[in-house]
Image (spheres, rainbow, N blue to C red):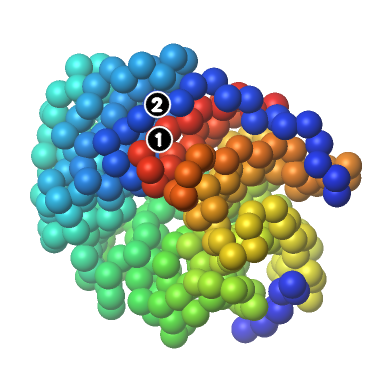
Amino acid sequence: MARINIFGGAKAENRLRPVWQAPTPDHVVGLTWSPDGAKLAAATVSGPVVVFDAHTGKPLHELKGNGFGTAAIAWQPGGSLLASVGQDKVVRLWDTATGVEVKALDAGAAWAEKVAWHPQGQFLAAAAGKKARVWSAGGELVRELSAQAGTVMDLKWRPGTNHITLLAYGAAATYDPFAGLEPVKLLSWKGSPLAMAWSPDGKILAHGNQDSTVHFWYFDASHDLQMWGYKTKVRELAWDFSSRYLATGGGPVVCIWDCQGGPKGPEGTKPTMLPGHDENSSLTVLAYQHRGFLLASAGSDGKVMLWQPTNRRGAQVGEFAFPGVTEASALAWSLDDKSLAAGSGAGTVAVFRAG
């Protein structure tokens, strides 16, 4: 395993143009856009999920969410269903046209924290405790996957496949939930992972870890390397659409790794460093556009920053700060990449036009 150490322009016009702001009942823990861009859902830590008119900011529905607190939400690709999970052991499916709960699925254990739709929208996966379950969009259980060595910290569908990856202590296990209980690949190492991100081409799996490192796997070859030297544990990861650039957090500075160059990827290179958030803060979220070159970052300093990392005239191209002492806690790009939503720890959602 190779190890890479990281080392510690002028501002352009502000390309984050505010459209609207609206309150939510509590700290915003998740944001997701409807496929047509007409609605935006915001999940709050105490449970309620607010569905807004994405153009005006008018609240359309306030869903009760999950008992004891909602942890994550996800909008069905190409559909109208919204999935939510939380501390009540239930995966809830909501009809966003009516605001009515249409299904309540047993997550298998308390404290379900992750939920993910298959990219085509016909299957839904959720993790609770050491296990994950997969259902059809209609709520029929397809498979309960094998228990992991520790709590499942993240789960993601591998792009271009029907395989799903579970991230837990000591391994990233990838399964075909339609074939059986044995993983199709097990990437093992000693460590406590926190979050992962697949490159859009499905070739590279990156995950941030408790020990302030980022692990990086070439999936087919099972070749790995590790980036180290981060200030804090790493939960913030985002790939650009070309699968060339990986943005990572782990402190107040955005690090951009250039992952071209064959099987060695960024090995032996230095990342591009993008300072802008307050020095004593930490990044909370990173989000690249789906098909564009803009990267958004959010931090515990309450700032939302917009970057164009390859812009030679200056990478920082936009900035917004939530008022008061609060963090910027969530980010989400609309599917057409024209709008960016941000949430705050004080219970505010803001939508911007970006470009």
Find disc 1 in the rendering and name its residue.
348
> Residue 270 location, x and y as percent?
78, 69
Q: Name the residue furthest front.
A: 324
Q: Which mark is residue 22?
A: 2
Mark 2 in CB contact with mark 1 (< 8 angstroms): yes
Residue 117 appears left or right of 316: left
On the picture, is 267 further left or further right than 141? right
> Is residue 215 among what the camera can see?
no
Local secondary structure at mark 1: strand
* Residue at (58% x, 25% y) in the render: 18
In the rendered structure, which amino acid carries the disc numbered 2?
A: Ala
Q: Is residue 208 above or below residue 312?
A: below
Nearer to me, 100 or 275: 275
- Mark nearer the N terminus (2 vs 1): 2
**Toward the viewer: 343 or 336?**
343
Q: On the image, which quarter does residue 355 sit in? A: top right
> Mark 2 falls on what kind of element?
strand
Q: Amino acid at mark 1?
A: Thr
For marks 2 and 1, give the CA distance: 6 Å
Residue 29 in view in this figure: yes
